[in-house]
Amino acid sequence: MKIDEFKKLHSIIGNCREINDLVETIMHIAPSETSVLIYGETGTGKEVFANAIHGASRRSKQRLISVNCGAIPEGLLESELFGHKRGSFTGASDNRKGYFELADGGTLFLDEIGEMPITTQVKFLRAIELKEFMPVGAETVTKVDVRYIAATNKSLQEEVINKRFRQDLFFRLKAVTLFLPPLRDRREDIGELADFFLEQAALKNNYAKFQLTPEAHGILLDHDWPGNVRELKSVIETAATLSRTSIIGAADLNPIIHPNGYSSASKYSLVPTRKTPEELDREMMLRALFEIKKDILDLKDLVENNHPVKESIRVQEIKRIDELEKEAIINALERTNGNKRSVARLLGLSERTLYRKIKEYDIPL
């Protein structure tokens, strides 16, 4: 099969050299049983490539089970992966199969593998090496035949150095390592990706076929896309939904990409860092909260410009950072009718961090 045919079959968009090299590698390794580790920033499409590996493997007729290790609370992760027996812990009212058993005969894709707790990594490594595991509360092992694909946006080598990831598990997973380039490093693919997402939006909503003006293409090419392909897809879908015509121009994109008149990439630029995901989540959230607070105060200044007690009003507006965080979470929960996944997306948090903050601030659900 040719590279272009493979990409079309597995919905891989792009013709840059890096993508074509990745596809060629995948075509070579997919039929094997080798475990694969995929590196890439958030939103680069790691799951798309995992699906392509499974789809081109000898296990393609069996199930591909995808697990986001960062979205499952730490206390539940072991049960979710390995299953549990009835009565093994509070709330375990029935026997339950875990993702390992559900993937038997097929492929298990573990996204955000770097978020897996060190204690769970021990049991995970055993399952890989011996092809067996013991469900929570069980007294006998369960045999499985699974191929493993893992993905991360972290440097697992640094995690190993910092004792947050087991070295033996790292070496076991990295038999074949793939590196997905960020969208800013494959700008020649932005136009093709945008056209693909526009076509998807038209089919999904039964719209007429969309077209981007040259000015709109220029805006897409100039943006740094800190959220990568996922951000581009979101921008295109929003523009298609809000557009009153089938022509999408600069005026349709600017309010979405640059809502405050400047690039969101400069506001939340991603630079190399040694901070943990929780620290990055908190930093980004605080920046957003400060920007919101600043906008509110600027509006009040306009309204209260001649108000004699303006300064006392402003003093009363000052709140602690944790209060602002709690308000932001409560407002997002109300807006999404309690959908925690949507809340995490709105606030730029991982779901695990969101659950921790809900518990920390004692927010009723």
Image (cartoon, helix red, strand yellow):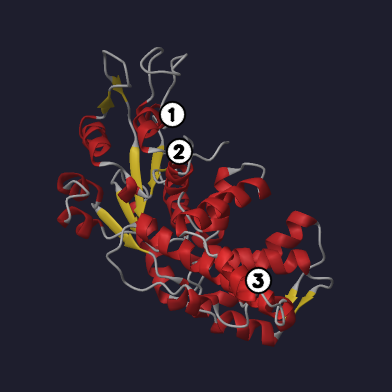
Secondary element at tag 1: helix
Q: Name the foreground residue: 155 vs 350.
A: 350
**Label 1 environment density (alpha carbons within 10 Å; few <14, some 14–19, many ≥20):** some
Please name the residue that numbered disc 1 is placed on: 102
Query: What amino acid is labelled 1 in the image?
Result: Leu
> Which quadrant of the structure image shows residue 312?
bottom right
Q: Which mark is residue 195?
A: 3
The reply, left or right, for residue 45 in relation to residue 193 is: left
| Residue beneath the point at 68% across and 87% down | 215
Task: Tell me which amino acid carries mark 3.
Answer: Asp
Q: Is residue 88 left or right of residue 5?
A: left
Dividing the image into 4 quarters, which one contains the C terminus?
Answer: top right
| Contact? badges 1 and 2 (CB < 8 Å) | yes
Q: In the image, is residue 326 above or below residue 301?
A: above
Residue 23 is at least partly visible in this image: no
Picture quadrant of residue 230: bottom right
The local crowd at label 2, few if under 14, some if 14 to 19, many if 20 or more residues have their Cα within 10 Å, is some
Q: Residue furthest front?
A: 308
Mark linked to residue 65? 2
Q: Is residue 78 visible?
A: yes
Total marks placed:
3
Q: Who comes first in sequence, dot 1 or dot 2?
A: 2
Residue 263 position in % (x across, y down): 55, 80
